[in-house]
Amino acid sequence: MAPRTGLSARIELEVTDDDTAEAFRSGSVAVLATPRLIALCEEASCLAIEGHLPPGGTSVAKRVQFDHLVPVRVGGRIWAEATLDRIEGRRLVFTLSASEEAGLVGAGKLVRVIVDRDTFLANVR
């Protein structure tokens, strides 16, 4: 079954010490790290298209544009959502959002490209 626009997925996370900027070495504060937030959104994008790629196919991230709007403390609960908005050949364009009870935490776009897993791995340097 091929990917189609509208596919989406949502993933929840309770922020732990392992998810902080300190743990990711991307800052010196004990709040949700931007790289962890983006990884959560990427995970949601992969989940959205699971079962919709050709045999032997996978997808890889090509471009991420993301605004991390507010900090989230350890113990905070967030959810990330990814929705497939456009298909341009092998390129899949997702809208990303991350929220908590109080509102939007971050938002952006992600482009993933469908590749043949074996061919892709054969070309890794």
Image (cartoon, rainbow, N blue to C red):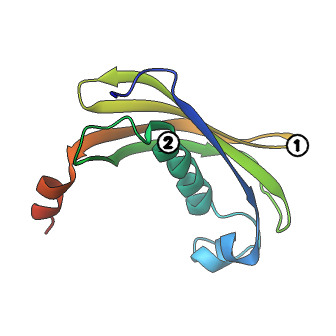
The residue nearer to you, when weighing 69 against 92, is 92
Q: Identify the image quadrant of the C terminus.
A: bottom left
Q: Which residue is mark 2?
A: 45
Q: Which residue is mark 1?
A: 101
Residue 103 against residue 60 in the figure, above or below = above
- At a point 38% along the width and 37% down the height, the residue shown is 111
Q: Quadrant of residue 40?
A: bottom right
Question: x, y (%) of residue 47?
Answer: 51, 45
Is residue 53 shown left or right of residue 105? left
**From this viewpoint, is residue 82 visible?**
no
The residue nearer to you, when weighing 69 against 94, is 94
Is residue 79 shown left or right of residue 62? right
The residue nearer to you, when weighing 120 against 2, is 2
Q: Label 1 amino acid?
A: Glu
Question: x, y (%) of residue 54?
Answer: 25, 37
What SS does tag 2 mark?
Answer: helix
Q: Identify the image quadrant of the N terminus.
A: top left
